[in-house]
């Protein structure tokens, strides 16, 4: 892939335009350098003592500086994939390696004539190669920096380019070192002892001109990035370095020799300091961005929790009362109206649930419990649920799953994914069509569940938008119901179960969605899931007092109507938390239903007081709330709630829970979420 986004690219010094502040600072550095250079010129030939420790100290620092600079530039190349950065990083690596060869061959430092088979001309020629090669790399960088072509491809391609660049640099350095040592007799003599020969002037002039040319080319290649600006400062220092150390002085160990090398060390430090400052700024931005992202994530979670509560509360009345109407005797027209109410309410509820699920996955808060699951069982349950929808379209459902394959998955989440894919296969199919579910082993060893329909298919150009949230590919104009979140959610759920979701489609023939999941290895006995049958509206043997602490009149009325289907139950209600605590102590109800949002006390505080009072600590408490976030559910159950139901209430589920609570023995009731 191409390197980075446009916004992300502009945070680097190699792409960030140089501002007035950077220009003023760079100019000040150059002016100070000029002043020091002019002050040193008259004394360049003054002989000084031979400080042998100066050479290894200076060049070791130079090597470390250039190596770190090269690594940082290679790192920027890995993100930006810019050929110019690759060349410049190679240039700094070249100077580091050449400095190593130079110090090893320096006469009298490690050996009388230097190491590596060096002779009297080796060190000087290595200096010339070194100071001529880097300006060539800078010129190449300047010529390439406005080239918009990048080294594209996967992340590994950047590593290959960097490795190849390093290999080329090593080969060039070895070749030049070999030429300056073993092949020194083929080169003109530019040193006589520690003094320069007449030939040195022409050789060093060429090197000096290359540095000056690099400075000019950089200046002319506008616009200037921050990196370009400081490279120009570097080349100015190189011009002064060569002038003092090899042109205006008389030889080694005079003032020009020492001053020129100090300029060289400073030149090596300028870009490094800028890159290190940039890394510090990037780290600070990362910390700030992380803090902002965490704050935004908390704000999003709070918003979703609030929206969930605000939307589920009215839906609780809409869906709850419509379910109660279904239990009454209705005319066909009335029943049809009730079905429309429930259809609209459940569509909104599905949308809320899918948005919350996606938010949980993004926040890493979704609960996934992997276990060995028989494929035939899960597929059969999903087909049973979608069969009424298929029957209305006269679509044939074919279960082609055979064998005893098991996958590692979360039963509820896998059922959710299969149900979504099967529902889509039916909804977007043609009348009298066909949907087939098959199970095979994929080449990677995973289990592949494929759902193939005979619908109109999806055009190739639209496949990349298939998993975009709220993107329905024009189906919103076809009258087919949907939220545009199902596929996006399904893909993320499958990935959370360490699987993959693929799609293949042919226009006019149909579409195949394939879920690939890891097989269950060494599976234990698996209990098949059961599809609970809703209890009848008039289950007997449910007696006792139920306390409902809730301040919303519509919710109170709904629970009153639900409890009326259990004639043996007596309902007490309280609209305040404190009043509810009094009723709980005085009447000792068999169970308490508690809302979390109360006018005087928070529901969590009411729960804590109920559990802290010896007279009420053993009364089962069922939390009923519109907040469906998993953290809230887990926290309340850990604080002593016996069950947690989310609004809108499922009437059958609520009645079943009441039956278990009022007819149980000492065994705690199962948690319902």
Image: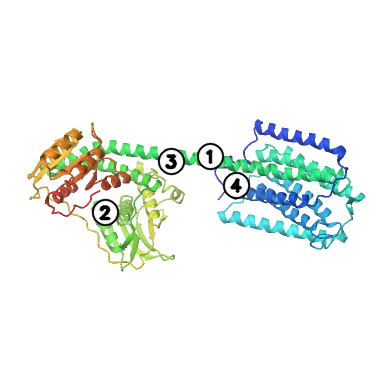
Relative height, residue 589 to residue 165 (above, below) = above
* Front residue of 46 and 290: 46
Q: Nearer the viewer, residue 175 or 471?
A: 175
Q: CA distance from mark 4 to mark 2?
A: 49 Å
Quadrant of res 12? top right
Are the residues flagged by discs 4 and 2 in contact, CB closer than 8 Å? no
Q: Which residue is mark 3?
A: 294
Res. 149 mark: none
Give the vertical position of 577 relative to 76 (above or below).
above
Q: Which residue has dot 2 on it?
A: 386
The residues bearing labels 1 and 4 have C-alpha atoms spaced at a distance of 18 Å
Which of marks 2 and 4 precedes in the sequence? Answer: 4
Write down the residue under mark 1.
285
Which residue is located at x 71 percent, y 56 percent? 169
For the point 73% across and 43% down, the residue is: 267
Alpha carbon of mark 4 to alpha carbon of mark 3: how far?
A: 27 Å
Residue most extreme to the right: 198
Report x, y in % for residue 109.
Answer: 80, 56
* Residue contact at pointers 1 and 3, CB within 8 angstroms: no
Q: Nearer the viewer, mark 1 or mark 4?
A: 1
Q: Secondary structure at mark 3?
A: helix
Sequence-wise first label, 1 or 3 = 1
């Amino acid at each position: 892939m191409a390197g980075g986004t446009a916004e992300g690219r502009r945070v680097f010094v190699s792409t960030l335009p140089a501002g007035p502040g950077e220009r003023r600072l760079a100019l000040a550095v150059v002016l100070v350098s000029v002043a020091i250079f002019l002050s040193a010129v008259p004394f360049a030939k003054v002989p000084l003592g031979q400080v042998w420790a100066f050479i290894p100290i200076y060049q070791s620092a130079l090597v470390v500086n250039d190596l770190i600079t090269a690594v940082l530039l290679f790192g920027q190349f890995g993100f930006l994939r810019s050929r110019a950065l690759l060349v410049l990083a190679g240039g700094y690596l070249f100077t580091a390696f050449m400095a190593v060869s130079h110090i090893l061959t320096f006469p009298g430092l490690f050996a009388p004539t230097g190491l590596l088979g060096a002779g009297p001309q080796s060190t000087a020629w290595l200096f010339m190669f070194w100071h001529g090669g880097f300006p060539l790399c800078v010129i190449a960088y300047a010529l390439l920096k406005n080239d918009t072509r990048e080294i594209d491809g996967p992340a590994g391609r950047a590593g290959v380019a960097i490795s190849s660049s390093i290999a080329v640099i090593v080969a060039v350095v070895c070749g030049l070192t070999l030429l300056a040592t073993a092949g020194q007799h083929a080169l003109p003599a530019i040193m006589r002892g520690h003094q320069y020969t007449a030939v040195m002037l022409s050789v060093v002039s060429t090197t000096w001109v290359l540095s000056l040319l690099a400075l000019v080319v950089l200046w002319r290649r506008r616009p200037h990035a921050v990196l370009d600006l400081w490279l120009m400062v570097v080349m100015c220092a190189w011009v002064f370095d060569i002038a003092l150390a090899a042109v205006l002085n008389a030889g080694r160990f005079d003032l020009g020799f020492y001053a020129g090398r100090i300029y060289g060390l400073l030149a090596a430090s300028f870009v490094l300091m800028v890159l290190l400052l940039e890394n510090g700024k990037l780290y600070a931005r990362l910390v700030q961005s992380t803090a902002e992202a965490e704050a935004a994530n908390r704000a999003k979670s709070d918003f979703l929790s609030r929206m969930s509560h605000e939307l589920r509360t009215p839906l609780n009345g809409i869906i709850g009362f419509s379910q109660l109407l279904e239990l009454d005797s209705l005319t066909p027209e009335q029943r049809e109206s009730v079905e429309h109410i429930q259809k609209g309410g459940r569509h909104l509820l599905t949308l809320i649930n899918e948005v919350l699920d996606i938010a949980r996955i993004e926040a890493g808060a979704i609960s996934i419990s992997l276990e060995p699951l028989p494929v035939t069982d899960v597929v059969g349950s999903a087909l049973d649920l979608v069969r009424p929808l298929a029957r209305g379209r006269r679509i044939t459902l074919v279960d082609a799953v055979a064998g005893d394959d098991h996958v590692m998955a979360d039963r509820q989440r896998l059922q959710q994914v299969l149900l979504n894919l099967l529902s889509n296969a039916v909804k977007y199919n043609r009348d009298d069509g066909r949907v087939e579910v098959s199970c095979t082993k994929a080449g990677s060893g995973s289990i592949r569940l494929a759902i193939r329909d005979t619908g109109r298919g999806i055009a190739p150009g639209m496949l990349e938008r298939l998993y975009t949230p709220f993107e329905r590919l024009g189906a919103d104009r076809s009258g087919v119901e949907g939220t545009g979140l199902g596929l996006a959610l399904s893909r993320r759920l499958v990935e959370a179960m360490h699987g993959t979701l693929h799609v293949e489609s042919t226009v006019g023939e149909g579409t195949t969605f394939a879920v690939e999941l890891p097989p269950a290895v060494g599976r234990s006995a698996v209990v098949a899931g059961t599809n609970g049958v809703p209890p009848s509206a008039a289950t007997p043997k449910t007696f006792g007092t139920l306390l409902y602490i809730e301040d919303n009149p519509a919710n109170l009325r709904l629970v009153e109507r639900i409890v009326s289907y259990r004639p043996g139950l007596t309902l007490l209600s309280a609209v305040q938390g404190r009043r509810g605590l009094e009723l709980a102590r005085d009447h000792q109800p068999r169970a308490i239903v508690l809302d979390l949002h109360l006018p005087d006390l928070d529901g969590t505080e009411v729960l804590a007081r109920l559990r802290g009072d010896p007279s009420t600590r053993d009364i089962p408490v069922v939390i009923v709330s519109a907040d469906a976030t998993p953290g809230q559910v887990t926290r309340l159950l850990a604080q002593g709630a016996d069950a947690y139901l989310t609004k809108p209430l499922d009437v059958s589920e609520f009645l079943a829970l009441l039956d278990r609570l009022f007819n149980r023995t000492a065994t705690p009731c199962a948690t319902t979420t």
